[in-house]
Image (cartoon, grey):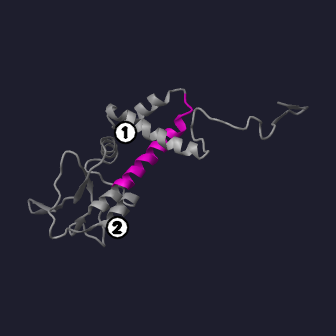
Amino acid sequence: MCIFVDKLLIMKDFVFYIKLEHYLAQWLTHSLGNPVRFPAQSNENSVIRRFLQKLPPDKLPEMPSDDTVAIVIPDSKAKDPAVYNYLGPLAKEAVVESIEDLFRRNLWSELGDMTSSSVGLNKTIAAWCEMHGIDIDYIETVRQKYYRMRNAYNRKGMFLGSLTRKREDKTPVFVQHRTTANNTEQL
């Protein structure tokens, strides 16, 4: 879309609209603006570029609504956004999936090492939500998402930040010796 102001050509971003869960939309727009602009070499932009196509003749251009998030179509030499600015329903599902993956990676990387702190996990998650622009109404949703991720690893025997660990083997694998200059003693 082009706009002329005092005989100057101003290019405006082309966008498409997707529906996201409310907490996800809040996190995404807080992190990357509104409309959402992914970093140039991001996985999300790769997914968008891969599935961009020309607007089919039987379709009308999308219009924003209250329950959608606007996402900027990345610039591309191969697919000019002025021409290639349509994503089909399944392509949008792929974009949503890449956004959900990004959210989980962000959540896990920032909260993964916080589980051993003196602050309870519920308060930690609430503070994380506040820091990332997620309303208090969705703290429980984010907490459950975190627990599901952690429990999925626990079921496979990988204890990543679990505060209650079930250990079958009560005997140590090795005995560590304390050494000093003059003697060696067993702990």
Instruction: Note whether residue 186 is visible.
Output: yes
Q: Which residue was labeled with disc 2?
A: 50
Q: Which residues are magenta?
A: 96-117
Magenta segment includes 98? yes
> Residue 51 in the image: x percent, y percent?
32, 66
> Residue 29 in the image: x percent, y percent?
30, 45
Q: Is residue 134 above or below residue 54?
A: above
**Main secondary structure found in the magenta portion:** helix
Q: Residue furthest right?
A: 182
Q: Is residue 37 above or below residue 157?
A: below
Residue type at numbered disc 1? His
Give the foreground label among 1 and 2: 2
Query: Distance of mark 1 from mark 2, alpha carbons?
Result: 29 Å
Instruction: Note whether residue 42 is visible.
Output: no
Q: Tell me if label 1 and label 2 are in contact, CB under 8 Å.
A: no
Task: Identify the mark at residue 84; answer none if there is no mark.
Answer: none
Label 1, residues with CA under 10 Å away: few <14, some 14-19, many ≥20: some
> Residue 2 in the image: x percent, y percent?
15, 63
Quarter of the image with the N terminus is bottom left
| Residue shown at the point (59%, 47%) measured from the top left | 156
Chain-order first, disc 1 or disc 2:
2
Q: Which quarter of the picture shows residue 126? A: top left
Residue type at numbered disc 2? Arg
Task: Identify the mark at residue 132; answer none if there is no mark.
Answer: 1
Label 2, residues with CA under 10 Å away: few <14, some 14-19, many ≥20: few
